[in-house]
Image (spheres, coloured by chain):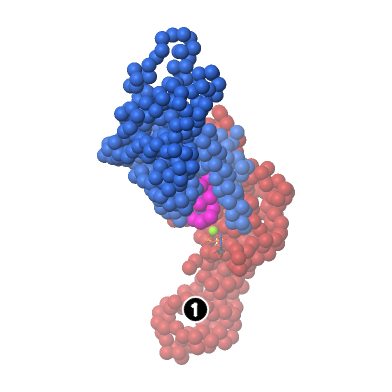
Chain colours: A red, B blue
Amino acid sequence: MTVRITNLVKRYNELLAVDHLTLNIDQGEIFGLLGPNGAGKTSVINAIMGLIGIDGGEIKIFDKSLNDFEREIKKSIGIVPQDIAVFEDLTAYENLAFFGKLYQLRGDLLKKRVEEALHFTGLWERRKEFPKKYSGGMKRRLNIACALVHQPKLIIMDEPTVGIDPQSRKHIIESVKTLNQKGSTIIYTSHYMEEVEELCTRIAIMDHGRIIALGTKEELTSLIGLEEKVVLGLASVNYTLVDKIKKVAGVKDCVVTDHQVTVISERDKGNLGRIIDCVSDSESEVLSIHMEKPTLEGVFLTLTGRSLRD
Amino acid sequence: MNFFSIAYYTILRNIRDTKSLIQVLLLPIVTILILGTALDGAFAPPNISKTPVCYLNQDSGKTAEQFEAFLNDVKIRELLKLVPVKSYEEGVALINDRRASALIMIPDDFSTGLETGQKARIHVYSSRYGNFRSSIVRNVVDSFINRANAMEAVYKMNLEDVRFDSAEADVIREMPISTSGKIPRAMDYYAVTMLVMIAMYGTLYGVDGFAEDYFVSVGTRIKSSPIRAYEHYAGKAIGVVFTIFSQSIFLILFSKYVFGANWGNNMLTILLIAFSLSVLSTVFGIMLCILTWDQSSASAIANVLIPVFTLLSGGYMKFVIDNQAFNRLRHLIPNYLAQTAIFNNIYGSRTGQSYMIVAAIWAMTLVMFFIAFIAGRRRVQ
Ligand SMILES: Nc1ncnc2c1ncn2[C@@H]1O[C@H](COP(=O)(O)OP(=O)(O)OP(=O)(O)O)[C@@H](O)[C@H]1O
Ligand SMILES: [Mg+2]
């Protein structure tokens, strides 16, 4: 087992950021942590890296307790922090060399590893430039390269694709796959469900510091696979309407966002007509009707009553 | 040696930060140049008013006579205003009334003592206030004694008697307060205060170096690596101290060779003082950072405190305030301590005091280190 987290608790003063979280990650996985802003993803990662004190629970990595073997464990982990963590006043090459040295790499081996990491992230041609001159996507790639110099067994990527162009995003997704094929275990956090769906062998959906669902993509979507989702665009929405819809036979839940009403109901109940009746009864008007297949977004919505992205 | 890598890259990055570097070095150089030339008049000896001194001669021998003649020399009279007194008590009373800065007393056995090769002493009693003035008196007396000793040696070797008058010119030149001698010119003065100022501005390097690891994401990456915390901080601190110290050395050399500023003969002690101050400002920066827990507040505080320190220590403009509380408080300002140590080292003979001050600077550094250490432990959750 590469990562074994048992009953992890992390508080920031009154705020319970991680709430008795238990999680096991196997060797060779690309494990996805999916959750909205503030769900506690970064807190979990910082706890794994020993960067923050924890208020309860136990963390074991490579079957060793983080408490007792912190330095040894850290040698085999590479981290891609959510905020870009490179020195602006060192060139790309120097950045990699610096971080390589922190992992005891020296001389020819250091040179070789730095070169490999720069080639891998497509930055070799621009190795002599300072990150200030890089585009957002190149900075993100450098942020990843710095985590790879020492060829870690476990790579933790905290939202590695935030705010970048589709081309760089694609490049990063492909490199994650390659790294995994070369044998690294990967923990990947994101609030882009498309990325997580495409990459991850298993996914944990986090909210309010807890894991609310865990499994493969198929397992997760089948959670809501027995349900239908109808999204109605309305001219106006009021709460008596929501209450009325909730009372229609077969409807399990009804959620309002702006001028949209999302209705989740048991499959094949044939209650769409009755729902639309409710709308015209309350003197509103249906502007659009949209039926959705189950997705992770839908899983999240079903489980929490909220949308994944704000 | 991980901390060596950290120190190396810290220095490399500080050197690359040319904007700060130019600011750090250009500011003092320009200040030395402008104030050093504009205010030169303020430092010239004519501005020193005569120092009032009581004089009591209880000896009637030959050497005492010579000394009296020496004191009545025109050049000496430019510096000292002699007030003959009849007793020790009268002299002390005048000093207490601040009507005299010192009492020069020649005991009755002075001439015989000197002639028979025994101990001979001229006593100088000075006021606790106005150290500068009593040092003039002490220096005048010292230079006479040096002469007298030399004459005595010559006499004993049976050579021709060296007449005191003929040596007059020499005596004056040797005196620490003559124009070409040891009183600092404005240039020399500002070279010292500006050195102290930039060493203190090193605090900002301390703030930045530390803040980077605590408040910025690169710190996350460094702390995720297997490096030990002490290696990390030792490396960082060594890099920062080295940066500040090299800037200090640059300023010393530049002012010495380009402006011809007087740094005295004991360069090693001056380097020791500059080094101690570099360590102090590094730790001061770290402490500010931990206490405020915010980089911009820490920088802002440093940016206010250091000019104020410089000002109060007379770094921009030499001034004397006759207020005991203020003068005592000044001794808590690192700038003032370091300036005093350097001036002592260049212009005074009391190197012992310089080392005392160096010890005080280190003591202050240690206190700040402990404050930072204790506050730091409480910060980390
Ligand atoms: N240092 C801190 N001090 C106080 N509260 C914090 C701190 N770090 C995080 N929090 C809070 O803890 C909760 C979890 O934060 P965390 O950064 O782990 O979430 P996240 O899932 O990574 O979110 P995001 O998607 O925005 O990165 C949030 O409510 C956040 O405001
Ligand atoms: Mg986060």
User: Label 1 is placed on what type of residue?
Assistant: Val
Give, as a single range, the part of the protein colored magenta: B283-294
Residue at left offset 47%, top offset 76%: A257
Count of residue discs:
1
Q: Is residue A280 left or right of residue A224?
A: left
Question: Which residue was labeled with disc 1?
Answer: A256
Residue at mark 1: chain: A
Q: In this view, does A298 lie to the left or right of A136?
A: right
User: Compared to A29, does B60 lie above or below?
Assistant: above
Task: Please identify the dominant SS of the magenta region.
Answer: helix
CA neighbours of label 1 inside 10 A, class few (<14), some (14 to 19), many (20+): some
Residue at left offset 59%, top offset 82%: A250
User: Compared to B231, does A137 lie above or below?
Assistant: below
Residue closer to the observer: A87 or A227: A87
For residue A267, say whether it is visible. yes
Q: Measured from the top left, where is residue B123 in percent x and y?
A: 49, 33
Q: Is mark 1 on a helix, strand or loop?
A: strand
Q: Measured from the top left, where is residue A231 in percent x and y?
A: 48, 76
Residue at left offset 53%, top offset 86%: A243
Q: Measured from the top left, where is residue B49 in percent x and y?
A: 32, 40
Ligand 1 contact, mark 1 (Cβ < 8 Å): no
Q: Does the magenta stretch include residue B110?
A: no
